[in-house]
Structures are given as C-alpha cells and as structure tokens.
Image (cartoon, rainbow, N blue to C red):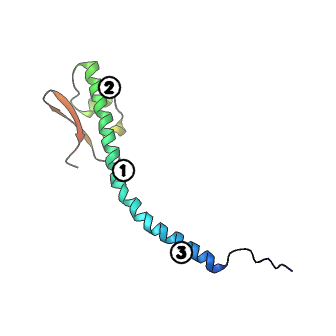
Amino acid sequence: MFNSQKGFTLIEMLIVLMIISVLIILMVPNLSDKSKEVYDKGCNALVSVVQAQVDAYYIEKNSYPVDLEVLETSGYITEEQKKCPDNTDLQITNTDGKAIVSISAGI
C-alpha cells in the first residue's frame, strides 16, 4: 500500500544524537572555565563605575569619601554596588590625597 522509503532509520538517528552528544561534551568544559574570566571582567567594570562615583562625589563635595558607606548614604551607589559578582568586597583607599577604589584583598 505505502511504498514510500522516505525518512530516517533508527541507526541514522542514533548517529546524529551521538555526534551532538560529543559536541556538547567538548563544549561544556570550555564554558565552565570562562566563569572566572566573566567574574573578573564584571568586577573590574564595577570598580570603574564606583571610581567614577567617587570622582563625582569629590566634584560635588570637594572632598573624597572615607568609605563606601558614605557613597551609599549620599545616593551615589547602591548596596549591591559594594560587592563584585563573586561576592568580594570593594574598598576605598585614601592615598596621596586621592581616593582609589579597589578589590578588598582580605577576602
């Protein structure tokens, strides 16, 4: 009745699934290695943003903030901007009359 031979056999489907599985097995470890790099770039970007807010604070108040709490209470940054995506804290270091934002070394 139906003599159509179109379609895939079970073997062909298994071969395609095997190829897809091998590709996934090769890609997943490469993606997981990138998470550290992504966190580092995100943290560096956050440091730049907070440093810009420190400079904005200086322009308006004519003095540098002593810590991040002062920036937060003044409305320059939010609570979430005091930590990097990997939960390392940011800190302000006052040296040579200038405030520098950096990643906290203790954590």
* Circle number at residue 74: 2
Q: From mark 2 to mark 3, how far is it between C-alphas?
A: 58 Å
Disc 1 is placed on an element classified as helix
Picture coordinates of residue 17, whole percent (x, y): 57, 72
Residue 64 sits above or below residue 79 on the image: above
Q: Which residue is mark 1?
A: 38
Q: Earlier in the sequence, mark 2 or mark 3?
A: 3
| Label 1 vs label 3, nearer the camera | 3
Residue neighbourhood size for the residue with mark 2, other residues' Cα within 10 Å, grouped as few (<14), some (14–19), many (≥20): few
Q: Earlier in the sequence, mark 1 or mark 3?
A: 3
- Which residue is located at x 23 percent, y 32 percent? 67
Q: From mark 1 to mark 3, how far is it between C-alphas?
A: 31 Å
Picture coordinates of residue 88, whole percent (x, y): 28, 47
Q: Is residue 106 left or right of residue 35?
A: left
Q: Which residue is mark 3?
A: 18
Q: Quadrant of residue 52?
A: top left
Q: Nearer the viewer, residue 50 or 20?
A: 20
Q: Earlier in the sequence, mark 2 or mark 1?
A: 1
Residue neighbourhood size for the residue with mark 3, other residues' Cα within 10 Å, grouped as few (<14), some (14–19), many (≥20): few
Q: Quadrant of residue 48?
A: top left
Q: Nearer the viewer, residue 32 or 84?
A: 32
Disc 3 is placed on an element classified as helix
User: What amino acid is at disc 3?
Assistant: Met
Q: Is residue 28 left or right of residue 63?
A: right
| Label 2 vs label 3, nearer the camera | 3
